[in-house]
Image (cartoon, rainbow, N blue to C red):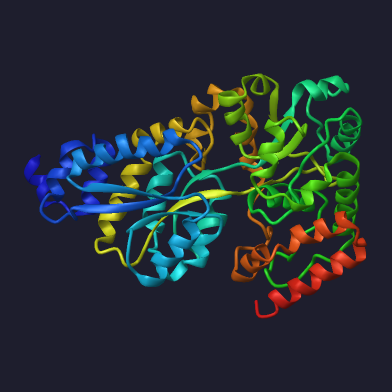
């Protein structure tokens, strides 16, 4: 058996290791040609145990199995895109890196085609969620491996909602408006970000737009479609929602603002990741006990939507041994390895592989289950159009966010839609 393995190609070894323990075989087969080390660059996780698990368990297990040292390089929150950009432009630095959002498209030419291992990983993991491809497939090629989605859902005070007669979270935006009016009258306003942060503004405004049947651009990715009756209805609703349920401060909020307001008991409802409940349980247990989480409401179309906020892993083209990096990626995403990594963060990163749809970690905190269920209707900004450079520019310039925010600040619906339409036509004129 040893002679057969030593003579095998890397692809043969992958097939063998898929049927047997990765253990010493993989290390023995690559001892002579394998690189001494490779680096995976990641943004520091909101969940400390997540980074610790990679460093202490995953990296050490791979080194023991193969002799290859995996260096886990973390960068501060908010700086990973800058570091990814620097590495891509200079062609030096980490072989592998965490991507987010639609960055595989932005870094297309600097990333290795991973279609082959995406197929292998998908087959072993029960298949990929369909929306995983939205973030990583560029011109028919998988330019990154989907890891997990950080959902943006409703976080609310169950006890305060109960006080105004709302026993379960409202199913529609209209019902949430009605509840919010009652709660604000009781001194418990809502707080939804309308400033120039990144996650918590897009996290509810794009889903709101889509749930009214509106969109920025048609499916062709070229035809600007923001000027519509559906958009006008969404804008009118948002203005009323803001005036009747919220603190005025939200117009200047960034991503940390709603967390602080919720945990200081200034607001009764917001749109956020699982972080509010996580911190509340850890640092404010009384608040943690009465914090609920729910999917976004349905709009007039009868549909509900959520923001797709994916973390993915790519391999840079400057990598000296691309196959070695691919081998690690396949090993990492094997359920035997990646299950523990997911579990270390409970359910903060919702897996894109179907075999984890009902994994035990989802039931560790049942209040997190809406984040799992939201995967079915989560999309990137610009949906239903495919990801593109113009769409990235629209997000960077806060076109949709500002359309809603300016309406809330006093501009007419006609004016804010005209402004957004003009911006989008300029952005997409060469698409």
**Residue placed most toward the observer, 86 or 214:** 86
Using the rendered image of the protein, determine whether residue 189 is visible from the camera's viewpoint: yes
Q: Is residue 138 visible?
A: no
Q: Image point 17% across, 45% down: which residue? A: 67
**Residue 367 x %, y %:** 63, 25
The quarter of the displayed image where residue 317 is located:
bottom left
Q: Is residue 136 left or right of residue 270?
A: left
Residue farthest to the bottom, as pictured: 430
Q: Residue at image x 66%, y 19%?
A: 286
Horizontal and vertical percent position of residue 161:
82, 25
Question: In this picture, is 85 found above or below 250?
Answer: below
The residue under the point 65% across, 76% down is: 431
Please state if 126 lies on the left or on the right of 229 as rendered. Answer: left
Q: Nearer the viewer, residue 276 or 96?
A: 276
Q: Residue 206: where, in percent of width, then height?
A: 73, 53
- Which residue, as the protein is rendered here, is positioned at the far left? 3
Give residue 144's position: percent from left, percent from top: 44, 56
| Residue 158 falls in image quadrant | top right
The quarter in which the N terminus is drawn is top left
Whether 210 is drawn above or below 389: the answer is above
How many numbered dots are placed on residues in this image? 0
Q: Is residue 35 above or below residue 414?
A: above
Left or right of 132, for residue 320: left
- Comparing 244 with 370, the one in front is 244
């Amino acid at each position: 058996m040893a002679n057969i393995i030593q003579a095998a190609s890397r692809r043969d070894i992958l097939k063998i290791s898929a049927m047997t323990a990765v253990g010493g075989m993989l290390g023995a087969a690559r001892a002579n040609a394998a690189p001494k080390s490779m680096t995976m660059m990641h943004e520091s996780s909101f969940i400390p145990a997540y980074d610790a698990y990679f460093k202490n368990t995953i990296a050490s297990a791979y080194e023991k199995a193969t002799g290859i040292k995996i260096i886990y390089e973390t960068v501060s929150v908010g700086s990973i895109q800058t570091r990814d950009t620097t590495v891509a432009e200079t062609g030096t630095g980490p072989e592998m890196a965490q991507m987010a959002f639609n960055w595989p498209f932005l870094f297309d030419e600097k990333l290795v085609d991973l279609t082959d291992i995406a197929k292998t990983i998908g087959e072993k993991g029960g298949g990929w969620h369909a929306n995983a491809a939205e973030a990583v497939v560029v011109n028919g090629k998988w330019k990154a491996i989907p890891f997990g989605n950080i959902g943006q859902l409703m976080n609310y005070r169950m006890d305060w909602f109960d006080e105004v007669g709302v026993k379960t979270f409202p199913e529609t935006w209209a019902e949430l408006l009605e509840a919010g009016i009652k709660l604000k009258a009781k001194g418990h306003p809502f707080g939804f970000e309308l400033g120039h942060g990144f996650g918590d503004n897009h996290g509810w405004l794009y889903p709101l737009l889509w749930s009214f049947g509106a969109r920025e651009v048609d499916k062709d990715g070229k035809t600007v479609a923001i000027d519509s009756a559906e958009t006008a209805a969404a804008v009118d609703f948002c203005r009323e929602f803001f005036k009747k349920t919220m603190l005025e401060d939200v117009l200047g909020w960034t991503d940390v603002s709603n967390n602080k307001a919720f945990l200081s008991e200034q607001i009764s409802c917001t749109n956020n990741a699982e972080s509010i409940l996580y911190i509340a349980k850890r640092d404010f247990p009384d608040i943690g006990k009465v914090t609920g989480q729910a999917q976004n409401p349905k709009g007039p179309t009868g549909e509900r939507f959520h923001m797709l906020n994916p973390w993915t892993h790519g391999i840079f083209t400057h990598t000296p041994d691309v196959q070695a990096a691919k081998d690690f990626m396949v090993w990492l995403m094997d359920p035997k390895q990646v299950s523990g990594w997911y579990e270390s963060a409970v359910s903060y990163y919702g897996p894109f592989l179907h075999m984890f749809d009902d994994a035990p970690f989802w039931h560790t905190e049942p209040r997190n289950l809406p984040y799992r269920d939201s995967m079915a209707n989560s999309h990137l900004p610009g949906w239903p159009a495919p990801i593109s450079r113009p769409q990235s520019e629209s997000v960077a310039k806060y076109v949709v966010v500002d359309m809603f925010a300016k309406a809330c600040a006093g501009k007419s619906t006609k004016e804010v839609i005209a402004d957004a339409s003009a911006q989008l036509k300029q952005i997409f004129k060469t698409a």
